[in-house]
Amino acid sequence: MFKLFFSLLLTACALSAQAEDQITPPRIILPCARNIELILSDAPEYGDLWQRLREGFTMRQISDPLVTHHEQWYAKRPAYIARMMTRANRYLYYITSEVERRGMPAEIALLPMIESAFNPGAYSTSNASGIWQFIPSTGKNFGMRQNWWYDGRRDIIGATNGALDYLEKLHTMFGDWELALAAYNWGEGSVHRAQMRNRKLGLPVDYASLKLPNETRNYLPKLIAIKNIVANPSKFGLSLSDIPNKPYFMSVATSKHMDVKLAAQLADISREEFIALNPAHNRPVLLQNSNDYILLPTDSVLTYKNNLENYDKPLVSWQAYRAKKGERLDHLAPRFGLTLERLKSVNGLSARDNLSDGETLLVPLNGEVAENEGEFEAFNMHLHPTAKIDRDGASIKYNAHSDEPLDKLASRYHVSVASLKNWQSKPKGRAKSARVSHTAHKPAHKPVRRKHH
């Protein structure tokens, strides 16, 4: 029955555009899951995804004290591991299935743990973004559209397929996975040059023999350390919550522009859950031509479909506004019922107040959206030019504006004011910088209730 269900659903990757003057009931698909029926029918049955991953581990153990160092680092941070695994729960089934389909080592499915800690909003100091940490140029090379509305580097399906395509290319180029992983982190040209230097000196050109920068030298040991923890968590005093060996999400074809807030409500999920599955959207509006599908939890798809079919109100509460010469943000914000800070946040603007002639802004159709707009700031956090996440994904460093209240900053990053004060020791309630190491989840705003079947 499971196989039949999926064979009926997985009929195509390409989506056709729908007419703008009607709401077409969404088609339920899993985009670009090539030959997934073969995966489902031929793969052994596993009750838990961790067991399935363990069976697929094929990379050799390396004798390197750095592996032990990273094992100990992770073992001392069970709360960090728990948060990372909770985030991984959304994405790991899809990634594992794609890794298996391509015949790659199962360890590759764990790579986002060291790239981003499975944080879909991760943004590095080198401008890498998403769970796979693509820099803009590499993302563009692998077909990831990046514009004001949308950043394909954060698209879960597209970035996963791009990352695996790139890793396959590197494996073909270098002949083994250790060098391929070094090149994924450092760049293929850098690894080639390191090999050329060794050849001139008559030295071996394998991974262990190359002179690598510190980050790259630690890259493979981190992955092996994570693999060893997943293989035997009790050995390190850790426990991993079960991840069901079944799809967490499905994709739904879209045919109309829609508010992010409304899409989450129609699916009866929190806005945070919706954004975690659809992190590529930069604005509070889903443009139909930005992507042809959205991802929803599998048990929310029918709820979304039924609620959308019965929804008879406008789907969008935002509009594009073209600025006139001399207009200022601080004058426009109250006209549209927004604070200046919120208008800047929605539009990804920095400290400037003046607008260029003809510059386009996203503003509410009316003032009603303003009351809830603060909730969108968390969605937009990764767009701020000073919001950075380290390569371990352990913390985000955010340089706040000097006049930004701590309660605003705490709301944006889903932490308490007390935590920010403790981290930063700012007694007057204003922030200069803060380190944020976890994300909390809150319920959706007035959700449309799910219909259980």
Image: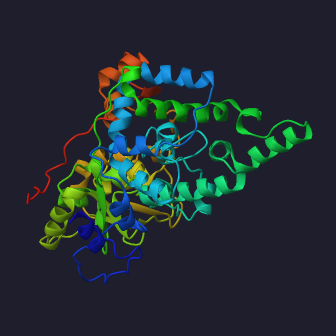
Viewer-proximal residue, 183 or 430? 183
Q: Position of residue 298 (x, y in %)?
A: 24, 58
Residue 316 visible in the current orientation: no
- Quadrant location of the C terminus? bottom left
183 up-or-down from 21: above or below: above
Residue nearer the viewer, 283 or 269: 269
On the rendered structure, is 127 left or right of 20?
A: right
Q: Quadrant of residue 97?
A: bottom left
Vertical order, 145 against 408 (above or below): below
Q: Residue at x 17, y 55 (%)?
A: 268
Does residue 179 show up?
yes
Question: Where does residue 263 sit, x and y in percent of width and height?
Answer: 24, 61
Instruction: Give me the residue at 81% from left, 43% from top.
Output: 195
Front residue (pair 207, 123): 207
Up/down of 190 relative to 81, above or below = below
Would you say 402 lies left or right of 18 here? right
Q: Which sits in the foreground, 263 or 90?
A: 90
In this picture the colour scheme is rainbow
The quarter of the picture where the N terminus appears is bottom left
